[in-house]
C-alpha cells in the first residue's frame, strides 16, 4: 500500500480557529495531516520569526495519520519547527488558513497566513494560503471547503514551479467560480487613533482603509472577489524586479 501524502497545516488565527478546523476536514481527505499552529492569534505577523525568547510546543492530539501541535511562536516558526523537529519526514504539501478575512492585493506583505505558505515554498514544498473574505465573527467557512478541495486537487495533480506558492482568496456569499488572477495594485492608508489610558498615558490604535488603484481591472484578485469569484494568485518568492535589473546594468557607480 502506498504511503499517503503528508500535509502540514498552519495558520495565523490560532489552533482553535474555525477556519483551521474546516481546512483540516478537507485536507484529511487527501492525506495524513499534521497541524502546527500558534496557540493564539498571530495576524499581521508576515514572515516574522521569534529570536528573542524561547518557543514552546505542546502536542494536543496524537492519532494515526493526524497530529496537532500548538506553538507559542509565529506561523513561520510553526513551519520551521515542523520541518526541523516535529515531523519524521518533510511534508508533501504546506497549507495555511483558512484565514478569517481576505489577504488580497498588498495584504500578502503583512499576512501571517501567507508567511506560513511562503516558508513552505522557500523549502521547495508546494504550498497554498487560503483566506475567506468575511470579517464577521460568525463567518461561515464551510461553504469555502469545496473550493479549497478543487484548488488543492489541481496543485496535487499539476504541482507548482520552484519558489512559487498560491494565494487563494474566497469571496463571501454566492461563489460563481475560480479565476487565476494577478495581485491588485493598491495600498493600505494607515490612520492612527490617538487615545489616553486610565493612567493618562497616550497610546495609538491602528485603523485605516484600503486604496485600490485598479478598481475596474478585471484580471486582479480584488475584482474577482467583488464579483463572486475565488481568486488564485501565483506568488513568487524571488522579489527581484528583473526589468529594472536589466536596465540597471548600464548604470555606472
Image (spheres, grey):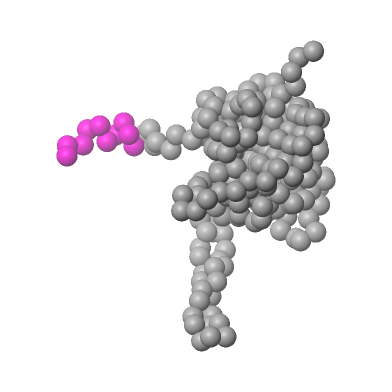
Residue 217, can we see it?
no
Residue 206 visible to an observer of this rendering? yes
- The spot of residue 123 in percent (x, y) is 53, 30
The count of marks equals 0
Locate the C terminus and report the quarter of the image it occupies.
Answer: top left
* Left or right: residue 244 compared with residue 106: left
User: Which quadrant is home to the N terminus?
Assistant: top right
Image position of 116 with respect to 18: above or below: above
Identify the residue at horizontal 71%, vertical 24% (top origin). Answer: 5
Tell whether 161 sits left or right of 128: left
Q: Quadrant of residue 95?
A: top right
- Which x, y percent locates residue 163? 51, 29
| Residue found at x 58% / y 28% | 125
- Dividing the picture into quadrants, the one containing residue 209 is bottom right
Q: Which residue occupies the foreground of this view, 220 or 4?
A: 4
Residue 142 or 54: which is nearer the viewer? 54
In the picture, measured across the screen, residue 218 lies left or right of residue 31, that is left
Q: Residue furthest top?
A: 1
The percent coordinates of residue 144 (x first, y second) are 78, 43
In magenta, the rendered stretch is: 244-253
x and y, in percent, of residue 189 in the image: 51, 63
Q: Residue at the location (67% across, 34% down)?
A: 8
Q: Closest to the observer: 178 or 36?
A: 36
Residue 252 magenta: yes
The residue at the far left in this view is 253
Amino acid at each position: 500500500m502506498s504511503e499517503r501524502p503528508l500535509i502540514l497545516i498552519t495558520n495565523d488565527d490560532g489552533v482553535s480557529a474555525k477556519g483551521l478546523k474546516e481546512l483540516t476536514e478537507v485536507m484529511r481527505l487527501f492525506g495524513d495531516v499534521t497541524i502546527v499552529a500558534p496557540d493564539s492569534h498571530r495576524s499581521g505577523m508576515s514572515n516574522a520569526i521569534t529570536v528573542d525568547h524561547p518557543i514552546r510546543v505542546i502536542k494536543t492530539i496524537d492519532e494515526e495519520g493526524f497530529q496537532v501541535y500548538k506553538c507559542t511562536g509565529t506561523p513561520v516558526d510553526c513551519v520551521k519547527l515542523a520541518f526541523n523537529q516535529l515531523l519524521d519526514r518533510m511534508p508533501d504539501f504546506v497549507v495555511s488558513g483558512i484565514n478569517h478575512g481576505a489577504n488580497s492585493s498588498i495584504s500578502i506583505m503583512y499576512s501571517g497566513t501567507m508567511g506560513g505558505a511562503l516558508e513552505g515554498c522557500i523549502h521547495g514544498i508546494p504550498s497554498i494560503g487560503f483566506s475567506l473574505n468575511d470579517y464577521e465573527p460568525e463567518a461561515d467557512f464551510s461553504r469555502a471547503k469545496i473550493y479549497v478541495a478543487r484548488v488543492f486537487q489541481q496543485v496535487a495533480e499539476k504541482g507548482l514551479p520552484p519558489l512559487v506558492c498560491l494565494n487563494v482568496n474566497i469571496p463571501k456569499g454566492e461563489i460563481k467560480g475560480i479565476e487565476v488572477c494577478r495581485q491588485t495594485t493598491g495600498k493600505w492608508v494607515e490612520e492612527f487613533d490617538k487615545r489616553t489610558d486610565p493612567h493618562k498615558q497616550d497610546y495609538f490604535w491602528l485603523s485605516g482603509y484600503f486604496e485600490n488603484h485598479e478598481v475596474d481591472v478585471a484580471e486582479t484578485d480584488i475584482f474577482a472577489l467583488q464579483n463572486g469569484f475565488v481568486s488564485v494568485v501565483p506568488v513568487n518568492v524571488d522579489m527581484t524586479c528583473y526589468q529594472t535589473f536589466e536596465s540597471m546594468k548600464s548604470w555606472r557607480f
